[in-house]
Each structure stands twice: as structure tokens, then as C-alpha cells.
């Protein structure tokens, strides 16, 4: 646990500066990037709570919401702080991610160095972590703030744990627990950290002792981590609840357990392949369950043999080369929550999931390569040349990969070039064209997504909205009905279908649709208002009024509802109630109040 004997502490500041410079050279370009039309809207620029900044009600919301199928209050607070300080300047939201990643890179080096004494090995691990192309997604995507922020607390927890091991005490253990809890409040990925600390007890901290395993020692080390394990268990219960309520969990009938396990096993190997040769990186990799392609048995069998063989070798070498077992089990264990056995989202794998797990593989390489070349007269020069070349090549690839994240169009078109049958990306590309007011290109993209995944409800819905905007109502109706065939309880599809029927003058059909939407989501003021309008257009103002009133109970400053309520009361001859609606509207929207007054006429 002391610094390497042959190294000088004077080198450490130079290494820190070099690591910082590498990270900034690769990532500072993101200061000119835009928000991405994928999750960035939910996390920042269309999130009403985040847009209020660090307001008291927003802070309360951060701790109580399952928005975006997650419970991560500190992540929400970090986005709110960005809005508070920088507004919606996307460049600074990106730069904060970069600065957090830079801090993670430097802290990883310092903590590993203090733990292992391996100065250059720790520097190599940190350099690869800092500039590996697989980590671009976590850094260059604003919505992945949770990755870089939670990892900051992961590494701080490791550092606090090292201090506790060096001199145990309640105060130092409390610092470990607090750092860990804060990390879990950024992202539940940290649930595996107590097990990683147990691995670190074996190497490099060597708390298991030099002889055979002592059950008493093992029990004591596990018992020591019980408070941390309780935190992990609590987070493991909350995370699935949030994901389930947010509709992010994929049911077994869509993605059977056997296919999930097969994909997980193959993904473990694919991540290693992309680590060695980081080509064809994409924001989304289609899952074989979604594309109906399945996985070749030779891939699954080969992955089982490889993983089993490496695991057996690592365990066999656990005494002679402890870093091998620690690094390999770090990789296997930290990927487990996101490997896809519990399927959250429709991706087969994701580059961002490797942000922490690859540290384990980097450790294996950093300590294994010098040992493999032991006895070579020029070992230090060879290792330096190869290590430097690997880091420079990684940095160049990461810089190129970061360029693809400059905007949604660049990101999605690149993904379509390097993947096949990617219905998810075609759908998102269609949304980009829609925002650019290019409806025909949007329609083509949505139809390509549907060709690949015929049961893709979101693509059908987006296609329906595009036809709706173009006034092609029959085509829109067909799309919305397809959505409802796939997702009978889609509130938005029922609401939009009602709007289309209203536009066609088919108000009875519109009422039926709005009623279904209200049944599914009874607290949506806009739909209640639309239902009232449909009744009014059928010349049934008495039926419309209760829906206007309910909309106003939910949204008291809903100007259109006050106007419609005043008109309905006027039609029924209830002038006193109509005047009350006018007075309320006068405080909310004077121009609309004047319009209502012209209908009501002067007071008698």
C-alpha cells in the first residue's frame, strides 16, 4: 500500500497533468455540441422541474420522482445546477460531464497508486480509462451524467475505504458509507461496489492474510460490509420498481429468459472485443429478441467456453497472480446489473455500461503485461513503447468517436452505417427529420423502422403524428389504431385519435376516444378539456361543463378552459357563472378575457 520503491513522488504531478491534458484533448470539442434528441429532452431541455433550476419544489421532486424510470436524485440535482448556472447552453452541460470524467481519471490513478504502489501500472489504467473509445458515450452524452457522477463517488468510496483500512475507525467507515450512499443516489450501478471492496481486500490490500483462507477472517471482512450491503439491497429493490413504473422493463413474452441469458453471455465477450478493437461503435445495438434474428449457437457456445476458461484460469492463479482474479471478477461482477438478464430497455448492449467494468480488465493488462515480459532486458522500453502507442491510438479513436455526438443527425446516421436492422435508430432519425420540418424524410424513416420491427408501437405512433400534422387524417387513424392494437392502454394514442376524429367532425367517435384516454390517465387537464370541447361541438354544453371544471381543478390557470367554460355557461343562459369565468380569465390572459367579453356582451 505504499508507493513504488523505484518511483519518485515528484513524477505524480506530471502524470496528473498528462492525464488531464489527454482527457481535455479528446473531449473538449463537446463544448460545441448540441443536446441529443434521445433522453436529453427528458433529462434537461424539456423537463419542467429541471428547467426551474435549484428551486425548492424541484429539489423535492428530485428526491421523490421515478421520472425516466430511475431514482437518482443527485443526478437530477446536478442537471438542475447546470440550468441554474448555465441555462440551456448545451456546451456547458457537456463540459461539466468532461470535468467529472477528468476528475474520475485523475482520482482513479491516485487511488490505485496508493492501493497498489504501482505508479506506472496505475497511470496506464487511468489513461486507458480516460481515453478509451468505449467511454465516449458516458462522457459525450448529457443524459449519461449519471455515469460520470456515480463513478466519481465510486472512486471516492474506494479512496475512503483505503483510508479506513490503513487506520480503522468509526468516522472513517462513516465516510465510506456516506460516499457509497451518495453514489447510489446518482445511479444504482454501484450496488456491486461492496463486492469489489471484498475483491480489493484480497488484492492489493491483502487483508485475507498470507496463508490459507481463514473462515474467521472471511466472515469478519463480510460482516464489516453489512451496512454497505444493506444499502445495495435497498437500491436493488428501488431500481426495479422505478424501471417497472417507468415502463422500461421488457416483459418475458417479448424477450424470453433463454435469449436474455444467451445475449448476456455473448455480450460479455463482445465488450472485450470492442475494448481491443473499438470499431463500429453505436448509440444503440439492436437486441436479437427485437429483430427476431436470434443468436447463432456457435457464438453462445464459444462465449461460454471463453468465459469459463478465463474464469477457471483466473481462479487457478488466484494466489500467484491475484490481480488476474481481482480484475477479471471485477469485470464480470460489475457488468452483471446491466448485462441484460433483467432487461431494461430494448438494447442488446451499450458502450456506457463498460464505464466501470473495464477498469478490471485494464488492471489485468497493466499488471499482467510486465509479468509476461519478466526477464526481458528491454522490458521497460518495450512496455513503454507499446503502452504509449495503445494510449495514443485509443485517444485518436475516442476523438473521432466523440465527433459523431455533435448532434442527433450525425449520431443516428453514423449508427445506421455501423449497425444493421436498427429500427430504434431509424425511429429516432425520423424524429430528427420531424423537428427539422422534413415530413417526407420522417415518414420514410418511420416506415423503415416499422419494416424492421413491425410491432414497434413508438414508430407507428410517430408516423401517425406526422400524418396528423400533414392533415392526412385517414392515414393517421390507421397508425393510431395500430398503436392501440399493440398497446391498448396507450393514453397518448387514444388522445391523439380523439383529436383526429374531432378534426374530421366525427365528435361522437372523438368522445369515445377521449373517454378511454381519461380512463387511463384521469388527471390530464388537456384531455379533459378536449372532451368538453367535443361535447360542446355536439351542442351539449351541459355535458361539457363538468369536464372543463375538472380540467380547471387540475390546472387552475388553464386559460382555454376558462374561456370555454364561459362560453358554455353563456350558451346555457347562466350569465352570472359566465361572468365569474371572465373575471378569472381576466387575471390569467387579459386578451382572451376580452375575446370572451365580446361574446358575452356588456353587463346589464
Image (tube, rainbow, N blue to C red):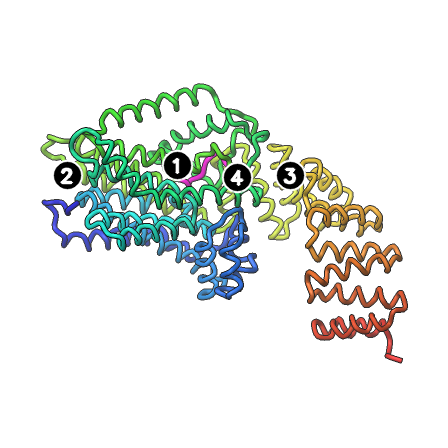
Q: CA distance from mark 2 to mark 3?
A: 57 Å
**Quadrant where the image shows the N terminus:** top left
> What is the C-alpha distance between the residues marked 1 and 2?
34 Å
Q: CA distance from mark 2 to mark 4?
A: 46 Å
Precedes in sequence: disc 4 or disc 3: 4
Q: How far apart in space, not on screen, are marks 1 and 4 (Cα)?
A: 16 Å
Please give the residue where the numbered disc 3 appears in the rendered image: 457
Residue located at (59% from left, 29% from top) = 253
Contact between marks 4 and 3 (CB within 8 A): the answer is no
Q: Nearer the viewer, mark 3 or mark 1?
A: 1
Q: Is the C-beta separation of discs 2 and 4 under 8 Å?
A: no
Relative to the observer, which residue lies in front, 590 or 170? Answer: 170
Q: Which mark is residue 381?
A: 2
**Which comes sooner in the sequence, label 3 or label 1?**
1
Number of numbered labels in the structure image: 4
Name the residue carrying label 1. 335
Q: Is residue 419 above or below residue 579?
A: above
Is label 2 in a helix, a strand or a loop? helix
Residue 562 sits in quarter:
bottom right
- Residue 388 left/right relative to 595: left
The segment highlighted magenta reads: 347-353
> What SS does tag 3 mark?
helix
In the picture provided, is 219 more to the left or to the right than 281?
Answer: left
Disc 2 crowd rating (10 Å Cα; few below 14, some 14-19, many 20+) is few
Kindly report which numbered mark, 2 or 4, lies closer to the viewer in this rendering. 4
Amino acid at each position: 500500500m505504499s508507493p513504488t520503491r523505484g518511483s519518485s513522488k515528484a513524477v505524480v504531478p506530471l502524470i496528473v497533468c498528462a492525464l488531464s491534458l489527454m482527457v481535455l484533448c479528446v473531449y473538449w470539442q463537446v463544448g460545441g455540441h448540441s443536446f441529443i434528441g434521445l433522453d436529453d429532452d427528458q433529462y434537461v431541455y424539456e423537463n419542467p422541474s429541471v428547467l426551474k433550476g435549484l428551486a425548492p419544489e424541484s429539489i423535492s421532486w428530485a428526491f421523490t420522482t421515478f421520472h425516466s424510470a430511475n431514482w437518482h436524485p443527485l443526478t437530477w440535482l446536478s442537471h438542475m445546477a447546470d440550468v441554474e448556472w448555465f441555462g440551456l447552453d448545451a456546451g456547458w452541460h457537456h463540459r461539466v460531464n468532461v470535468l467529472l470524467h477528468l476528475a474520475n481519471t485523475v482520482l482513479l490513478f491516485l487511488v490505485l497508486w496508493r492501493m497498489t504502489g504501482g505508479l506506472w501500472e496505475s497511470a496506464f489504467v487511468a489513461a486507458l480509462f480516460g481515453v478509451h473509445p468505449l467511454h465516449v458515450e458516458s462522457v459525450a452524452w448529457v443524459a449519461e451524467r449519471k455515469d460520470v457522477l456515480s463513478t466519481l463517488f465510486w472512486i471516492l468510496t474506494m479512496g475512503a475505504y483505503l483510508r479506513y483500512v490503513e487506520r480503522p475507525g468509526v468516522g472513517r467507515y462513516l465516510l465510506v458509507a456516506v460516499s457509497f450512499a451518495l453514489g447510489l443516489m446518482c445511479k444504482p450501478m454501484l450496488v456491486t461496489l461492496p463486492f469489489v471492496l471484498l475483491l480489493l481486500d484480497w488484492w492489493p490490500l491483502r487483508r485475507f492474510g498470507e496463508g490459507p483462507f481463514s473462515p474467521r477472517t472471511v466472515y469478519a471482512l463480510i460482516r464489516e460490509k453489512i451496512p454497505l450491503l444493506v444499502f445495495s439491497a435497498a437500491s436493488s429493490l428501488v431500481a426495479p420498481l422505478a424501471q417497472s413504473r417507468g415502463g422500461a422493463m421488457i416483459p418475458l413474452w417479448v424477450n424470453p429468459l433463454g435469449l436474455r441469458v444467451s445475449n448476456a453471455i455473448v455480450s460479455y465477450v463482445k465488450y472485450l472485443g470492442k475494448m481491443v478493437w473499438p470499431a463500429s461503435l453505436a448509440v444503440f445495438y439492436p437486441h436479437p429478441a427485437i429483430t427476431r434474428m436470434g443468436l447463432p449457437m456457435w457464438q453462445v457456445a464459444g462465449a461460454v467456453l471463453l468465459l469459463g476458461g478465463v474464469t477457471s484460469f483466473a481462479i487457478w492463479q488466484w494466489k500467484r497472480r491475484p490481480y488476474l482474479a481481482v480484475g477479471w471478477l471485477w469485470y464480470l461482477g460489475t457488468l452483471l446489473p446491466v448485462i441484460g438478464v433483467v432487461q431494461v430497455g430494448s438494447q442488446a448492449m451499450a458502450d456506457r455500461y463498460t464505464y466501470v467494468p473495464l477498469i478490471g480488465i485494464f488492471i489485468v493488462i497493466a499488471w499482467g503485461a510486465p509479468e509476461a515480459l519478466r526477464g526481458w532486458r528491454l522490458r521497460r522500453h518495450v512496455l513503454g513503447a507499446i503502452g504509449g502507442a495503445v494510449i495514443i491510438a485509443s485517444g485518436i479513436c475516442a476523438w473521432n468517436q466523440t465527433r459523431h455526438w455533435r448532434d442527433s443527425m450525425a449520431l443516428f446516421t453514423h449508427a445506421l452505417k455501423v449497425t444493421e436492422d436498427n429500427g430504434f435508430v431509424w425511429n429516432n432519425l425520423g424524429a430528427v427529420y420531424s423537428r427539422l420540418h422534413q415530413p417526407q424524410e420522417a415518414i420514410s424513416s418511420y416506415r423503415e423502422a416499422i419494416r424492421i420491427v413491425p410491432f414497434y408501437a413508438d414508430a407507428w405512433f410517430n408516423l401517425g403524428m406526422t400524418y396528423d400534422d400533414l392533415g392526412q387524417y385517414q392515414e393517421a387513424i390507421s397508425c393510431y389504431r395500430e398503436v392501440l392494437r399493440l398497446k391498448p392502454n396507450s393514453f397518448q394514442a387514444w388522445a391523439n385519435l380523439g383529436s383526429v376524429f374531432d378534426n374530421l367532425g366525427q365528435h361522437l367517435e372523438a368522445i369515445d376516444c377521449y373517454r378511454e384516454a381519461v380512463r387511463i390517465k384521469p388527471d390530464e387537464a388537456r384531455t379533459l378539456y378536449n372532451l368538453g370541447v367535443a361535447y360542446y361541438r355536439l351542442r351539449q354544453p351541459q355535458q361539457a361543463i363538468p369536464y372543463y371544471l375538472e380540467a380547471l381543478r387540475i390546472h387552475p390557470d388553464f386559460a382555454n378552459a376558462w374561456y370555454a367554460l364561459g362560453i358554455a355557461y353563456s350558451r346555457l343562459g347562466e350569465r352570472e357563472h359566465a361572468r365569474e369565468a371572465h373575471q378569472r380569465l381576466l387575471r390569467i390572459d387579459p386578451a382572451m378575457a376580452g375575446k370572451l367579453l365580446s361574446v358575452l356582451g356588456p353587463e346589464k
